[in-house]
């Protein structure tokens, strides 16, 4: 409530708008940097623009935004061109080429700045964190509206990036996954590479003044990397990265106001907190992403383990019925002795089978229902078909086929069982002479 009472849309609203535009513009092109394994290009460009800024000052004796932007953009594009040239003609790794180019240009920029040290006010904090809090102070009149200049610039860059992604989506997609195929289809991968690096350079330079080096590098990579963990579809990845980027920017400004007050401070750097929030969202994806999250993967493996154990219990009871030619009852301790699971897993699995109607509990233990017997018969059929196939078609010695079939049986569906059956001319028994149950 205190945040809402102190919130000023003319100040906080424009700051958030600048952060969101920067984050979204960066994420749009950052997706293809991640896919092409060029994640450090944004960092290299944001460091290498320093000589462009210095050269613009030397030529114009002014720190106005337009010449600074043009100088930095030119050097940003040159960084990408030099990196690609060294990689192609010098036959070196792209990371090494990038390191050579941006360190050399950054050093040259420092030398130029030192030469003009008496005339240039260079604030290291502004270079690192930008001045996004100052966004509402420098405005441009558009009709009847006073709009911050940074918002207009970042909005234009975001629209350019969005237009480029929409128009060249297919080309970017193919070039990112298979450059050779892109060339074979009639469009040069190098052109797409230079177009992408040019967009990254413009985005980095346009964002540099407002949010500094840290946020633009974070937003180029972290939201796309977060989206990459959540989906395997490029369109969905782009949408998720944009949402993550915008959310990180919004939460970052709110966090910059709220979090420090919890520790007795007034506030902290908004751009730094935006980058921090992007990192936290990435951490959430690492843990809970639907397909690649650590926690989700742990739960999925646990459920798979329980499913396999449940099938082993059914198969155990079915084989016992085969031997006794009658319905077999087996208690919990007997299941544990044969299959070896812990007490908790055994209780969980037996409860699952009871709830699904595949087992029934009597006073002496558990026995198969008709439904459970049908499922167990299918599992045993898969096992013995695999044993037959491994022994005859694959030539594996008989002493080793049981363990391999034990693993394969849990992943064999109706179609694959049919193929195995046809491949071996509908066998009646497995290599041990045991009957193969009908489908």
Image (cartoon, rainbow, N blue to C red):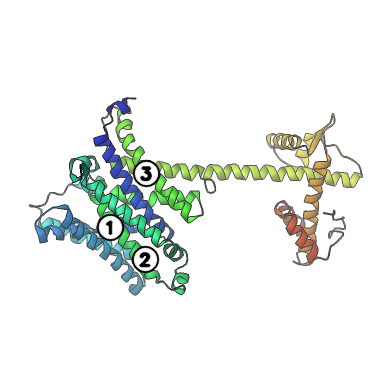
**Disc 1 from disc 2: Cα separation:** 14 Å
Image quarter hosting the N terminus: top left
Q: Which residue is mark 2?
A: 193
**Residue 140 point in image, percent of width and height:** 18, 46
**Residue 177 point in image, percent of width and height:** 47, 64
Image side of residue 220 versus residue 174, left or right: left
**Disc 3 from disc 2: Cα separation:** 26 Å
For residue 364, what is the image quadrant? top right
- Vertical placement of 260 versus 193: above or below? above
Question: Residues at badges 1 and 2 in contact (C-beta under 8 Å)?
Answer: no
**Residue 64 point in image, percent of width and height:** 14, 52
SS under mark 3: helix
Question: Residues at badges 3 and 2 in contact (C-beta under 8 Å)?
Answer: no
Q: Which residue is the extreme one toward the right?
A: 325
Categorize mark 3 by other alpha carbons within 10 Å: few (<14), some (14-19), many (20+): many
Q: Which residue is the extreme one toward the front?
A: 143
Q: Earlier in the sequence, mark 3 or mark 1?
A: 1
One can see residue 69 in this view? yes
Q: Which numbered tag is attached to residue 246?
A: 3
Q: Which residue is mark 1?
A: 202
Categorize mark 2 by other alpha carbons within 10 Å: few (<14), some (14-19), many (20+): many
Q: Earlier in the sequence, mark 3 or mark 2?
A: 2
Q: Which numbered tag is attached to residue 292?
A: none
What residue is drawn where x is 78% and y is 37%? 357
Using the image as rendered, state which of residue 238 and residue 118 is in the foreground: 238
Image quarter hosting the C terminus: bottom right
Image side of residue 436 versus residue 94, left or right: right
SS under mark 2: helix
SS under mark 1: helix
What residue is drawn where x is 38% and y is 41%? 247
């Amino acid at each position: 409530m205190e945040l809402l009472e102190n919130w000023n849309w003319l100040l906080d609203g424009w700051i958030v708008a600048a952060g969101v535009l920067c984050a979204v513009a960066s994420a749009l092109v950052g997706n293809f940097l991640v896919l092409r394994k060029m994640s450090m290009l944004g960092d290299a460009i944001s460091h290498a623009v320093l000589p462009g800024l210095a050269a613009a000052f030397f030529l114009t004796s002014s720190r106005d935004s337009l010449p600074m932007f043009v100088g930095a953009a030119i050097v940003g594009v040159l960084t990408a061109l030099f990196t690609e040239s060294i990689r192609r003609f010098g036959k070196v790794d792209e990371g090494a080429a990038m390191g050579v180019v941006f360190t050399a240009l950054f050093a040259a920029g420092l030398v130029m700045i030192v030469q003009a040290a008496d005339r240039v006010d260079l604030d290291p904090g502004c270079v690192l964190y930008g001045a996004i809090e100052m966004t509402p102070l420098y405005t441009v009149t558009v009709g009847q509206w006073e709009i911050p200049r940074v918002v207009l610039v970042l909005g234009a860059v975001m629209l350019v990036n969005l237009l480029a992604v929409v128009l060249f989506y297919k080309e970017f997609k193919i070039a990112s996954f298979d450059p050779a195929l892109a060339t074979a289809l009639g469009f040069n991968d190098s052109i797409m590479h230079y177009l992408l690096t040019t967009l990254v350079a413009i985005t980095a330079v346009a964002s540099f003044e407002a949010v500094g080096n840290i946020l633009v590098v974070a937003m180029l990579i972290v939201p796309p990397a977060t989206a990459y963990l959540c989906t395997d579809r490029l369109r969905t990845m782009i949408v998720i990265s944009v949402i993550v980027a915008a959310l990180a920017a919004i939460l970052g400004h709110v966090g910059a106001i709220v979090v420090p007050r919890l520790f007795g401070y007034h506030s902290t750097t908004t751009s730094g907190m935006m980058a921090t929030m992007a990192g936290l969202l990435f951490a959430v994806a690492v843990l809970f992403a639907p397909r690649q999250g650590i926690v989700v993967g742990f739960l999925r493996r646990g459920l798979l383990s329980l499913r396999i154990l449940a099938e082993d219990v059914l198969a155990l009871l079915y084989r016992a019925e085969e031997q006794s030619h009658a319905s077999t009852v087996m208690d919990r301790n007997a299941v544990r002795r044969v299959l070896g699971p812990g007490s908790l897993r055994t209780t969980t699995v037996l409860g699952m089978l009871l709830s699904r109607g595949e087992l029934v509990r009597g006073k002496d233990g558990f026995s198969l229902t008709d439904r459970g017997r049908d499922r167990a018969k299918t599992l045993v059929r898969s096992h013995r078909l695999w044993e037959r196939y491994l022994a005859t078609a694959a030539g594996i010695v008989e002493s080793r086929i049981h363990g391999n079939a034990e693993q394969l049986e849990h992943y064999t569906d109706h179609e694959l069982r049919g193929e195995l059956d046809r491949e071996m001319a509908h066998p009646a028994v497995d290599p041990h002479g045991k009957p193969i149950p009908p489908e």
